[in-house]
Image: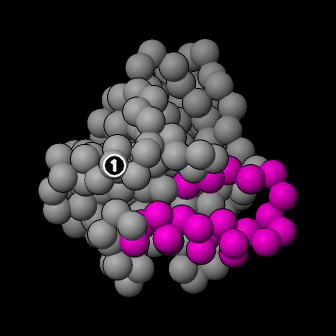
Amino acid sequence: MIEIEVKARVDDAKKMERAIISLGATPIGIQDQADTYYNAPHRNFEKTDEALRIRVEDGDAFLTYKGPKIDKVSKTREEFQTKIKDTETMGNILSSLGFIPVATVTKRRKNYRLGDFFISLDEVHDLGSFIEVEIPVKNPKNYEEKVDSILKIIEKLGINRTATIRESYLEMILGKK
């Protein structure tokens, strides 16, 4: 699966929420998420632009691997995710294999759907408010068209294309330290 995503900082979350709804997006839920990121013993994910995390959201947990970003404009990357039953055991398995917990990112995410696109309005602990617009695709052919469609949505929400951010929340938090 390829996750095509564009992110930007939001100054006024309430105003952005109104703009998202005025575009015709449908609210689909609110989630509290805690993402614990790990680094590999055999390569540095910071240098390879990969990510491995355990996400806990509203009682469910997932192990997710994200590959390196594949373009210079968006956060488009390959992603694999599976549901896990026991986060403590999964963390112990990863630690036993030499994976090191790096940081935990916590956020409240308001989710919306606009056609095939998902829009998330995130309030990230210690970072502020952000918007992410994404679409998952199975076939990466012509993904540039989807990136362009996302950028058009971002612009309709009053955000300039040049204001988009390619850094992950983890990179931002580690950059603050």
139 is within the stretch colored magenta: yes
Residue occupying the point 41% across, 79% down: 161
162 vs 105, nearest the viewer: 162
Vertical side of 153 occupied by 62: above or below:
above
Residue occupying the point 63% across, 79% down: 71
What amino acid is found at the position of numbered circle 1 in the picture? Ser
Residue 30: x and y in percent read 36, 29
42 vs 136, nearest the viewer: 136
Vertical side of 161 occupied by 141: above or below:
above
Find numbered disc 1 in the image and state the secondary structure of the residue it sits on.
Answer: helix
Q: Taking 10 as reference, is 118 left or right? A: right
Q: In the picture, which quadrant includes the C terminus?
A: bottom left
Vertical side of 89 occupied by 35: above or below:
below
Residue occupying the point 58% across, 30% down: 62
Q: Which of the 4 quarters of the picture holds residue 108?
A: top left
Residue 137: x and y in percent read 74, 53
Using the rendered image of the protein, determine whether residue 50 is visible from the camera's viewpoint.
no
Number of marks: 1
Q: Taking 154 as reference, is 40 left or right? A: right
Using the rendered image of the protein, determine whether residue 134 is visible from the camera's viewpoint.
yes
Residue occupying the point 45% across, 16% down: 59
Q: Dot 1: few (<14), some (14–19), or many (≥20) neighbours within 10 Å?
A: few
32 vs 95, nearest the viewer: 32
* Scheme of image coloration: one colour
Q: Which of the 4 quarters of the picture holds residue 50?
A: bottom right
173 vs 19, nearest the viewer: 19
What span is in magenta? 134-155
Residue 155: x and y in percent read 40, 72
174 is within the stretch colored magenta: no
Residue 68: x and y in percent read 64, 68
Badge 1 is on which residue? 22
